[in-house]
Image (cartoon, grey):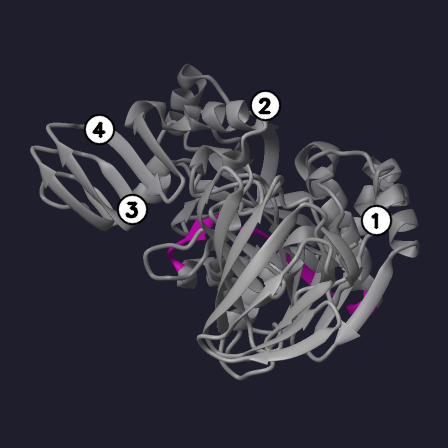
Amino acid sequence: MTTQLIPTILCGGAGSRLWPVSREHHPKPFIRLADGQSLLQKAFLRGAALPGVTEALTVTNREFFFKTEDELAEVNATGIGTAFILEPFARNTAAAIAAAALQVQERHGADAVMLVLAADHMISDQAAFAQAVVQAIALAKDGKLVTFGIKAETPETGYGYIEAEGHTVLRFVEKPSLDKALAYLASGRFHWNAGIFCFTAGTLLAQMALHCPDILAASRACMDRSRMAQGKGFVQLELDSASFQDVPSESIDYALMEKSAAVAVVPCDIGWSDIGSWNALGDLGTPDAQGNRVEGEALLHNANNCTIHSRERMVGAVGVSNLVIIDTPDAILVAEKACAQDVKHIYAKLKANGHEAHKLHRTVHRPWGTYSVLEEGAGFKIKRIEVKPGGSLSLQMHHHRSEHWIVVNGMAWVVNGEQDLLLNTNQSTYIPAGHKHRLENPGLVNLVMIEVQSGAYLGEDDIVRFQDNYGRS
């Protein structure tokens, strides 16, 4: 009988070292690469291509559900089932994996094999990966907790290591000093810890009961209080916020893998990278004769070994070397390549100062579509709003601002106070402050409109929702 394999994708994290493309509300898994696919989509396709896969499970923050659903639907050509566990906030990987195992055991049985993948890693050799998974499944069916050990090629100090003989794990080692990393590399016994795991749901839960029973018990109590919903081709479980708070926040490595005697490793060389910096992301591109890697438009003169990313504006670089230049509509990063890991400090300072650039892009994704801030100043803000066919904003009201809506593509069904209006291209309506209003797209093409806001306060929190199709308060 074919083994039932459930790819389980962990989709979270801030990706602070990839600012300004990665933001709190647009983290690393959603970054689009040069081929147009996001890291999340690549993780999904990697798992979906394996034999025996009929459903993929994604664990993510509930704020990312609609965006995640859209991303997977865009590439799910085979139509495999998609299941989601939605966390109200992050509680580290042990809690996420425990919840996933409980759901897999309930839906598919204790013998179902889980393949746990990070949504923000790259694996370039799918054939080698598939071969490693075959080995991992065999060990998992023999009662092992399997981790993947990546062939170490350089003395990386930012990775954890696994010392092993064959499939036998001797020990896990935290991020080492450079001297130790060099010794590990020379010994040939150490592998990078990739954070990829394989086990049956039953084995995982039995081992957690032995080594981290507090995490398992709290996760089980949370699952019992959580809401399950099913639709065409998908299953969605939203974790109860109050009880999820009681789940201890620990990594699966620390809580279980470093303690269990049932751990095995599959050494492999699969073209793995955790894309932990702009250097790593830049290395995915093809360099020119001077070692520059460019995504977007750039004109270079006497520039060497630079990584440049700019999809919306022209970048000119003259007489520079070893720089990372990342341009987005509202922020630009310039860094020495040797300091690429320190970008996280800029992100941390923006967050500490309450600056929006750590959290949001100019273009913000919502369940119904997107909006982009085109310009803002004292007393006004101009947005471009795009609503998917069938999409609907909430029935809402603003205390402090008025809005003028102009349709530039498609058609809009508008509630404006006591009026119901159907607006076509080049038509508009004015919504005074205090009026209940709603925007829907009844058409078959995307609705695009320009919104001009005016008023004393234009913050996104000036909103009172009366009805919402997406469960937002």
Q: Residues within 10 Å of mark 4 (few under 14, many from 20)?
A: some
Residue assigned mark 2: 352
Residue 404 in the image: state x and y as whole percent: 55, 60
Span highlighted in magenta in the image: 107-125
Discs 2/4, front: 2
Element carrying mark 1: helix
Viewer-closest of 320 and 40: 320
Q: Residues within 10 Å of mark 2 (few under 14, many from 20)?
A: few
N-terminal-most mark, 2 or 4: 4
Distance of mark 3 from mark 4, alpha carbons?
A: 17 Å
Discs 3/4, front: 3
Residue 4 seen anywhere in this rendered image of the structure? no
Element carrying mark 2: helix
Does residue 3 appear to the left or right of 43 in the view shown? right
Distance of mark 2 from mark 4, alpha carbons?
A: 29 Å
Residue 6 in the image: state x and y as whole percent: 66, 65
Residue assigned mark 1: 206
Residue 245 seen anywhere in this rendered image of the structure? yes
Q: Is residue 473 above or below residue 394?
A: above
Task: Tell me whether circle 2 and circle 4 mark residues in contact (CB < 8 Å).
Answer: no
Q: Amino acid at mark 3?
A: Ser
Distance of mark 1 from mark 3, alpha carbons?
A: 49 Å
Q: Residues within 10 Å of mark 3 (few under 14, many from 20)?
A: some
Q: Amino acid at mark 1?
A: Ala
Residue 357 in the image: state x and y as whole percent: 49, 36
Residue at 52%, 22% in the rendered image: 349
Residue assigned mark 4: 322
N-terminal-most mark, 1 or 4: 1
N-terminal-most mark, 1 or 3: 1
Residue 393 in the image: state x and y as whole percent: 66, 65
Residue at 78%, 49% in the rendered image: 98
Label ID, residue 357: none
